Amino acid sequence: QKEVEQNSGPLSVPEGAIASLNCTYSDRGSQSFFWYRQYSGKSPELIMFIYSNGDKEDGRFTAQLNKASQYVSLLIRDSQPSDSATYLCAVKGFTGGGNKLTFGTGTQLKVEL
Amino acid sequence: EAGVAQSPRYKIIEKRQSVAFWCNPISGHATLYWYQQILGQGPKLLIQFQNNGVVDDSQLPKDRFSAERLKGVDSTLKIQPAKLEDSAVYLCASSSISGRVYEQYFGPGTRLTVT
């Protein structure tokens, strides 16, 4: 079982719709959860983090965390073509001495006109 | 605030050759990470430094990869000798402690092609 799992997609949504990206993780001791956006040929860019159960909103983005189900999601409201990218879910665990991020393989999102 | 700097941006070498990548983290960030990202996959941590000490190098292929962070600032990642499967983007990231959350910021990466 992979430590962080994401559907690779592509996930296609029309412009203006809500895009829902999902991620599950295997380590119940995981502490913090991150969503990165990666445009083709570019490096990952942090867009959201969450560490408490529930929802966290930032502009058009909402991160949702359910630790009991080991599930984290990212909702993008009013999707725009500029949101087309790969979205990486990352989970922070703890190694002896420091924090460590484990990434999923990413979900490719395509927002269509 | 300047971001994470990396060089070179692109490198093409033949298998069995050696290569080195350089990273300069965000000023004041004590923690530095090297990741390998193979096409279609998420970044995989190779090595993590806290100041100039190694925190985690469990996924670093130590027979061919080495990394150092002298003086706790810049870092160099070396591959010697390179294999075809080392073709990937090598990402450097840095972070500082901010409350309970440890946000990592990535540099532009070095795209390595091994032929």
Image (cartoon, coloured by chain):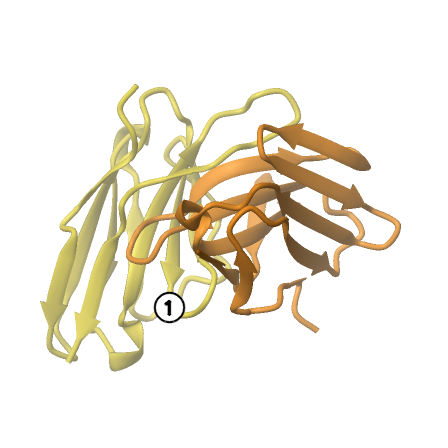
Chain colours: A orange, B yellow
Quadrant location of the C terminus of chain B in the rendered image: bottom left
Residue A92 visible in image: no
Q: How many numbered marks, from 0 up?
A: 1
Given residues A17 and A82, the one toward you in this image is A17
Give the percent coordinates (x, y) of residue B72. 33, 30
Is A40 on the left-hand or right-hand side of A69?
A: left
Question: Mark 1 is on which residue type?
Answer: Ile
Give the percent coordinates (x, y) of residue B38. 37, 68
- Residue appearing at x 83%, y 46% in the figure: A67
Is B44 on the left-hand or right-hand side of B93?
A: right
Which chain is home to disc 1? B
Residue picked out by circle 1: B38
- Residue appearing at x 74%, y 42% in the figure: A64
Give the percent coordinates (x, y) of residue A52. 78, 33
Q: Is residue B92 above or below residue B83?
A: above
Give the percent coordinates (x, y) of residue B59. 48, 63
Looking at the rendered structure, the secondary structure element under dot 1 is loop
